[in-house]
Image (cartoon, helix red, strand yellow):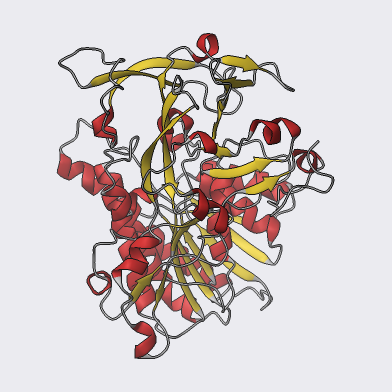
Amino acid sequence: MANASSETTIALVTGANQGIGYEIAKRLASEHPDYHVYMTGRRKDAIEKAAAELRSAGLDVEPMVLDVTSDDDIAAAVEQVRSKYGRIDVIINNAGICIPDPKDPVRQRLKHIFDTNIFGAVALTEAFMPLLEKSTKTRRVVMVSSGLGSLQVRTDPNIGPNRDFLEYGASKAALNHACLTFASRHYGDNSWKFNTCCPGYCATNMNSYTGPDDASLGSIRPVQLATLGPDGVTATFSNRQGRIPWAHHNFPASEILPGVQLYYEGNNTVNDNLASLDIGGTPSRRRVRNHAIMSEATPSRRPFKGSCHCGETQFIVFLMFPHAIPPPRPPKEKAPRSHQEFYRCNCTTCHKAGFFHMRLESSPDDFLLLKPLDPYKELGDYQVYQKDLHFLFCKTCGMRCLIFMGKGEVVEVDLETLGFKSESGNGDNRADSDAKLTKIWRPLKDGWLEGKKFGSYLSVNGYAVDAGQEGFDLREITEKKWVGYLDWLELHEDSQGVRHDRPWAGGAY
């Protein structure tokens, strides 16, 4: 057995030869030099190449051939770690697959997905339990899951791009359940941490690099959970923006895990106000909180109508409420956002125009322009500091409604299926008098990725959202400080984009 220092943390990351797994191993080893990281993968050449790249950068990583669908491979991995270190401290179950062959029978598709995503993760965790028990540190097990494993997300009729993925979503829901089961075995023992997280929709080989986020962003939350101390959370489901609901809020907590309370609280910031299971303390602390509290903090994506002062410009915007304040942006971060942002820019242009920005989770999915259908030609337009960034306003009343960069398209949609009932007087774009389809303009999905020629940017004026709609309360948005000030001069000086409660010193610029 190797004489590893007791200060060294032994970690293992599955599926680490590429994509999010590779970035997890890289971030873990670079940010925590006292960690020795096993990088595992099915193909010997691929995992050795990946490990060599990180070793050349001075990182303490070690390759290991491991197919999580093979019990023999798992047993060999356990023996390799046992013989060398006698313990393990951290396991990150990242290996996963997404889309089976649609030509296969459904039973075969389910078996194929479940074998890696759930059977492999659970079998590996169970096999390493004896070595985890040998650890004298906080034992941390992280399950890399997906928001599609949330029953709340699955039952939301407004979810657009995630309408299927039956096999994948079911496997991740099962993985979430397994994580809670592991956590429930260690009631009251803060030396064990079992957490599940969604890395976000990142551009990886698994999705043919169609995700809007860079894979490095997908490593943020798994590494945070893999480095928790004894005071850290356990039995949580989160992403880098905050918590994710485990299940639909109409389910009683006792049906999720008997005797254990599922609760949400706070503003859903990344580090503390996450969804968690209160599995410790006295029975009185494990009481079931009332449904109102649970449902109040459960976010939902809903459509809201917006317009200019005179009504010549009309749109529908989909927003998530309660709004989760996103984490500070890394210096010079250029990756497209995968979360909603509310803020005021601390510049003269935005101040004089009466504008607070609503950056959407996905502009192509969350913004529909009802009229006009050719905004570049029919709306007023001016540029401030970038020729391809258009500040669009109504030519009749002068109200600026949005900022856009990129290309758009006119398509026909059924507004009712998106959760929006068209009112009388708004049907002038109907494609057919007997049909429910309505012509709308929206940002073009092509070119949404960083680096494409027509990479899109869209920011809606929060004051253009029509007042009086249920669920959109400007007073609540203000009182809860969901809108902060961002100073772009500060960003250009490599700051982390901290949001301020008031304008920057000296006012606007």
Q: Where on the picture, by quarter, is residue 4? A: bottom right
Q: Quadrant of the C terminus?
A: top right
Going 52% across and 21% down the picture, which residue do you hit? 447
Going 38% across and 61% down the picture, which residue do you hit? 296
Q: Is 307 located above or below residue 285 in the figure?
A: above
Residue 127 as seen in the image, left or right of residue 379:
left
Going 44% across and 28% down the picture, which residue do you hit? 364
Nearer-the-camera pick, 217 or 288: 288
On the image, the x and y values in percent for residue 228 come to 58, 70
Residue 227 as seen in the image, left or right of residue 310:
right
Nearer-the-camera pick, 420 or 314: 314
Q: Looking at the image, can residue 34 be seen?
A: yes
How many numbered circles does the render carry? 0
Q: Looking at the image, can residue 16 be seen?
A: no
Q: Is 143 located above or below residue 206 in the figure?
A: below
Q: Quadrant of the N terminus?
A: bottom right
Residue 276 as seen in the image, left or right of residue 89:
left
Nearer-the-camera pick, 181 or 72: 181
On the image, the x and y values in percent for residue 464 come to 50, 33
Q: Is 124 located above or below residue 159 in the figure?
A: below
Q: Residue furthest top?
A: 377
Q: Where on the picture, by quarter, is residue 100? A: top left
Q: Residue furthest right?
A: 506
Q: Is 327 located above or below residue 440 in the figure?
A: below
On the image, the x and y values in percent for residue 424 come to 25, 25
On the image, the x and y values in percent for residue 481 come to 59, 55
